[in-house]
Amino acid sequence: MNMAVGLVFAGLAGAAQLPRPNVLWITAEDIGPHWGCYGDAYATTPNIDALAARGLRYRAVWSTAPVCAPARTAIIAGMYPTSLGAEHMRSEVAPPPWLRMYPQLLREAGYYCCNNSKEDYNISASGQVWDDSSSRADYRHRAEGQPFFAVFNYTMTHESAVRRRPHTWRHDVERAPVPPYHPNTPEVRQDWAQYYDNITDFDAKVGEHLRRLEAEGLAEDTIVMVYGDHGPGLPRCKRWPYDSGLRVGLVVFVPEKFRALIPSQDRAGGEVERLVSFVDLAPTVLSLAGLRPPEWMQGRAVLGPYAAEPPAFLYGLRGRMDERIDLVRSVRNARYVYLRQYLPHRIYGQYIEYMFQTPTTRIWKELYDAGRLDSRAQRQFWEPKPCEELYDLDADPHETVNLAESPDHRPVLEMMRTALRRHVLEIRDTGFLPEAEVHRRAAAAGLPIGDFARRPDLYPLERIVEAAELAAGRDEAVVPRLVDLLGDRDSGVRYWAAVGLCIRGSGAVAAAGDALRRLLADESPSVRIAAAEALVRFSGAPDRVPAVAAIMDLVSPETAGAYTAIEALNALDACGAAVVEPLRARIAALPLRDPKAPNRANGYVARLVEYLTRSASHTR
């Protein structure tokens, strides 16, 4: 036994000879807390419910990101992906040299670590992470007497399985609990009922694991944790940092011999009020193994000898989701959820090819286009966003009544706004530079993005965030200030100034005059794209020709890079069918690969090219 670990466990009450616990994680993709133990009467989850009756059920757990790759990045690193430049869906960045993935730390302490089998991290690994990470990975392969940490991840609940047909429904389709933001149609009810069917299948897998532990004599030596990786795989849940997209169930069973690892205020079989984030999972498993979490981890251990004080807030994010660009940050406390939209001119329901394969997405959009949606809550997804959103989860658990303009809730709004800004600055959020720009500037500095972001001389975050908040606010009185910022020395500030003018439309763009036109030759491709979009959409014909040319100069991943091409193609799409139509042949002839970029980034370029050449009249 590692000496430090042994000393920690020897110091626990009545644990002088206490062995180190095994830890088993049983995880599922794309499911919220739709389990019977969370009060869901439609759910059929007897195994999870029975485990919760003997264990701990955490009331408010946030996934950090409402989509798998950044969510898994938060888990494996114990850090917010926004601190590493890793918040964008299936990005791939080099971590700072000081970062170690938590299985590496466990293995050094003598644990056998296996993962069956999905990784999907947005940061690349340095050195061996797992003893085995494959479809055959199993704790049975450990050395005799060796403690294990094992992950079994199940995909039968994934978004793609919600829409798989044919399907024989076991839950009553007509009774499916459709949230008020979705239209209550047969297609939507079928998707929700199938989602619950898939959760029941996952629950059966949980039961198999628990029975196996008993049969192998491991049940009293193994801490079991069951959770999902983010909210349901349905539109406005998955990919959106509302509570509906971030909240997951978390049930933890701690055997009697290890009960000293549970904080004294928590009790088995009860609900735990503590707020939990995915960045807390790595420090928690290290603490359970008797290891002090490293200082660079941003999460707080929930259990074990290094359990920390609970946080007052949880934080969520939305960056690029597949091929579509966005920037949203969210925060919740025990009662309220606050969202800040930094690109409010982009609708919620931007066309994402993968999302539109789901029947709920397609029928929802069809009904919106036909003017047949019943409520504002249902129409909102297909319209431009407010700058700020505030929801009372006690009164409005589906987050449909925005209280951001309510005078009675002004103190709450200001509290949540302040908490979010403080968090952004504390973790050095890299999302306030466009994805292509943060890569460009970090490479110029010769640093991983995570180290670049910690250099205020290279990344003046406070000034850039101030510009972003100014840009996103829609206040017309700040137009002269935005025009001034077009000449700022920092490319991030110039970018936000151009975006802010575009958000405000023709009057603001006209007021910018020559300043916007000069940015068509800016050193930063992202600034060029932002300025060009504003000019194409809201300026006169003489400005459109050079502005369109500036965008088209950057649409090739081969010459401009994949991330720049994604930005340029999104901007081109936002300019509308009249602009795209004459360019379709040129777009169709584009190369689809940046030889220096990860394959998955090139895949998003290909999706955008296919979309723009297939039709110039899709959703924007």
Image: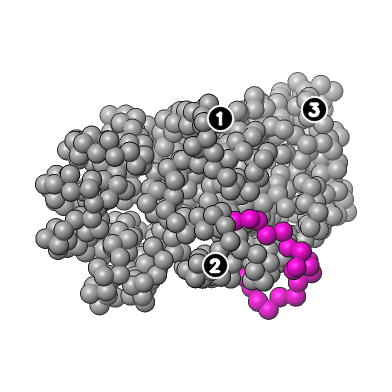
At mark 1, the secondary structure is: helix
Q: Position of residue 56 (x, y in %)?
A: 78, 38
Residue labelled with disc 2: 372
Badge 3 crowding class, 10 Å Cα cut-off, few under 14, some 14 to 19, many 20 or more, is some
Q: Amino acid at mark 3?
A: Ala
Q: Secondary structure at mark 2?
A: loop
Whichever of labels 3 and 1 marks the residue nearer the N terminus, that label is 3
Residue 176, position as x, y percentages in the image:
73, 63
Q: Residue at x 86, y 41 (%)?
A: 54
Q: Are marks 3 and 1 in contact (CB under 8 Å)?
A: no
Residue position for label 3: 260
Residue 135 in the image: x percent, y percent? 64, 62
Binning the other alpha carbons within 10 Å of mark 2 as few (below 14), some (14 to 19) or many (20 upward) gives some
**Within 10 Å of the Cα at label 1, are there few (<14), some (14-19), or many (20+) other Cα atoms?**
few
Please provide the residue range marked out in magenta: 162-181
Compared across the picture, whether 289 is left or right of 282 comes to right
Measure the C-alpha gap from mark 3 to mark 1.
44 Å
Q: Is residue 557 magenta?
A: no
Residue 336's disc is none
Amino acid under label 2?
Arg
In the displayed structure, 586 sits above or below 412; it is: below
Residue 408 is marked as: 1
Compared to residue 506, the image places residue 272 above or below, namely: above
**Residue 26 visible in the current orientation:** no
SS under mark 3: helix
| Residue at (40, 48) in percent of width and height | 344
> Which of 45 and 468 lies nearest the eye of the viewer?
468
Residue 520: give x, y in percent of width and height.
16, 52
**Quadrant holding the C terminus:** bottom left
In the image: residue 176, left or right of residue 361: right
